[in-house]
Amino acid sequence: MQDNSSAGTTLTRYARFARTTLESGTFIPTMRSVGKRALSTSHSYGLKRDLAVPHETPVAKIPISVRAMRDDDVEHILDTHAEVDTAERWERQTRGRLLDQGIGSPYVAVNSDDEPCYVQWLFSAEDNDDVQSFFHGIFPVLGPDEALLEGAFTPVRHQGKRIMSAGMSLIAEKATDLGARYVVTFVGTDNIASLKGCERAGFLPYVDRVEKRLAGRRRMEFHEMDAAGVERARVLKP
């Protein structure tokens, strides 16, 4: 039996989520997301980078550098009340929920004016419990020499400048400070632009992930790729 305090906390969380959804104008994409939880099948590739293998960082169309995200960056990159379309507001809102949890290490790529143009979270094996809880088991448990990149977001006004691949490449290298040699990330198989960006950042496919949802229940399947499978999955052919 659930105790009253736990039930109260759950109700409060749902109420806060509903209020935020209505206030931010993201009701429609939120309902679409909820609908997918009822019945859906999605296919993603897990991609991995070996930080011990030399890699030339891609060059963005503007000069960028990466640093840890600061509190004052939020209003510039994740403000849900900014004058952006509903799709981008939804993207900001989902990253905001991750930020509110206070898990992992968010990094930003900034331009020459120190304005954040891209954000992504880096998680180490020490974050395994938090990752499994927050993301509901959609990622494999990290080994002691592995890290995960998740939550990538580039505001529309900064898109088209190849910031993602350059920023992701540099953020991935921060994993060495966490004792990791390998960095993994997951991208939907139909998201060709992001798959290209990941490959430019030094990531190659290594596992298939199939997520099946039925009546709110989720089943995850991970299938390691052989060499032929890796080549079939690549979007930037050597």
Image (cartoon, helix red, strand yellow):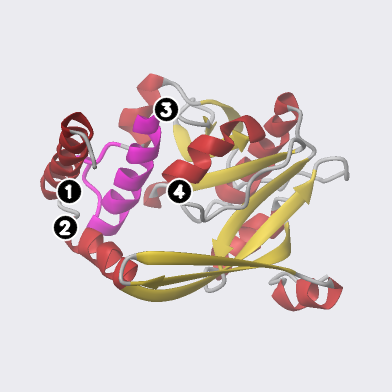
| Residue 118: image location, x then y, percent | 49, 41
Q: Which residue is mark 2?
A: 27
Q: Residues within 10 Å of mark 2 (few under 14, many from 20)?
A: some
Is 97 colored magenta in this rendering? yes
Query: What main secondary structure does the magenta stretch of the protein show?
Result: helix
Of 192 and 159, nearer the camera is 192
The residue positioned 38% from the left and 65% from the top of the image is: 217
The residue positioned 34% from the left and 31% from the top of the image is: 100
Q: Which residue is mark 4?
A: 135
Looking at the image, do the residues carrying marks 1 and 2 touch, with CB atoms under 8 Å apart? yes
**Nearest to viewer (mark 2 / mark 3):** 3
**Nearest to viewer (mark 4 / mark 1):** 4
Q: CA distance from mark 1 to mark 2?
A: 6 Å
| Residue 56: image location, x then y, percent | 81, 45
Total numbered labels placed on residues in the image: 4
Q: Which residue is mark 3?
A: 102
